[in-house]
Image (spheres, rainbow, N blue to C red):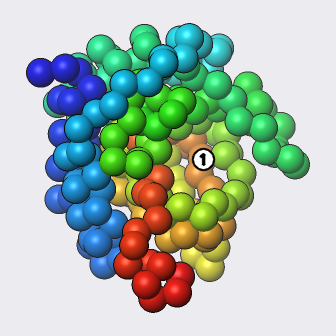
C-alpha cells in the first residue's frame, strides 16, 4: 500500500472514530470523499523552511501507526509559511503548512483540500476564517480556539471541527503543534437548505 493511502486510511478512521455532534456528519463526508480514486497532480518542489526542524519532535509525539506513513510522505511535502496581516512576532518563521491533497498537494481526491500545519512551541497561528468546513486531526499537541469559546487542548489524536466561516486560531504550547487538516468542499445539501 502506498504511504499516502496508508496515512489517509488511518487518519480518516481516527477522525471518524472521534467525531461527535456537528463534527459527525462532516467526518462521514470526509470518509466518503477519501474513498474517491486519486488523481495525480504535478507535484510541487519539496521545501523545508527552518521551522521543519520541529518535525522530528512532533513525530515523536505522534501515534505510532501514523508516524511511519507520515515519515514516508514528509520529504515530498512543500512546506511554506502563510502570510497573515497583523500576525504576532515570530509567526512568519515559526510555522509552515504543506498541502497533501488538492491542486497544490501530492494528489487530488474527492474535491478535498488537505494538508499539515506545523506551529513551533509558543507560537500562535492567529485568528483567521475561511468558507470551507474544516476538520483537524491533532498529531502532536497544541491548543485551539474558536470565536465564543476558550482555548482548549484536544490532545494527540483529538479532532477539531471548524464550521464554515468561524473565526479560529491555534498555537504551539511547550511542544510543537502538528495537525492534519481537511477543508471539505461544499455539499449539495448545504446549497439545498440555503447555506
Pinpoint residue 89: horizontal percent, then vertical percent. 83, 37
Q: Disc 1 designates what residue?
A: 171
Residue 25 or 42: which is nearer the viewer? 42
- Classify 10 Å Cα crowding around label 1: few (below 14), some (14-19), many (20 and above): many
Residue drawn at x 59%, y 51% is 170
Res 185 seen here: yes
State which quadrant residue 156 falls in: top left
State which quadrant residue 24 falls in: bottom left
**Relative to residue 158, is residue 163 depicted above or below?**
below
Pinpoint residue 34: horizontal percent, then vertical percent. 26, 46
Quadrant of the drawing holding the N terminus: top left
Res 152 seen here: no
Pinpoint residue 55: horizontal percent, then vertical percent. 47, 21
Residue 186 or 175: which is nearer the viewer? 186
Q: Image check: 20 left or right of 133?
A: left
Residue drawn at x 60%, y 64% is 131
Residue drawn at x 34%, y 18% is 73
From this viewpoint, which residue is outermost toward the left? 1
Residue drawn at x 67%, y 46% is 125
Amino acid at each position: 500500500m502506498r504511504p499516502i493511502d496508508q496515512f489517509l486510511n488511518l487518519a480518516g478512521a481516527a477522525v471518524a472514530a472521534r467525531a461527535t455532534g456537528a463534527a459527525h456528519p462532516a467526518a462521514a463526508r470526509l470518509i466518503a470523499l477519501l474513498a474517491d480514486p486519486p488523481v495525480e497532480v504535478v507535484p510541487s518542489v519539496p521545501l523545508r523552511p527552518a521551522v521543519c526542524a520541529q518535525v522530528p519532535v512532533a513525530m515523536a509525539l505522534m501515534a505510532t501507526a501514523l508516524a511511519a506513513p507520515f515519515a514516508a510522505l514528509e520529504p515530498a511535502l512543500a512546506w511554506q509559511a502563510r502570510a497573515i496581516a497583523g500576525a504576532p512576532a515570530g509567526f512568519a518563521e515559526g510555522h509552515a503548512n504543506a498541502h497533501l491533497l488538492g491542486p497544490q498537494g501530492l494528489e487530488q481526491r474527492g474535491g478535498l483540500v488537505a494538508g499539515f500545519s506545523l506551529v513551533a512551541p509558543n507560537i500562535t497561528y492567529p485568528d483567521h476564517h475561511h468558507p470551507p468546513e474544516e476538520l483537524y486531526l491533532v498529531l502532536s499537541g497544541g491548543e485551539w480556539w474558536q470565536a465564543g469559546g476558550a482555548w482548549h487542548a484536544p490532545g494527540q489524536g483529538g479532532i477539531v471541527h471548524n464550521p464554515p466561516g468561524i473565526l479560529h486560531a491555534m498555537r504551539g504550547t511547550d511542544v510543537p503543534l502538528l495537525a492534519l487538516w481537511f477543508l471539505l468542499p461544499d455539499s449539495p445539501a448545504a446549497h439545498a437548505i440555503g447555506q
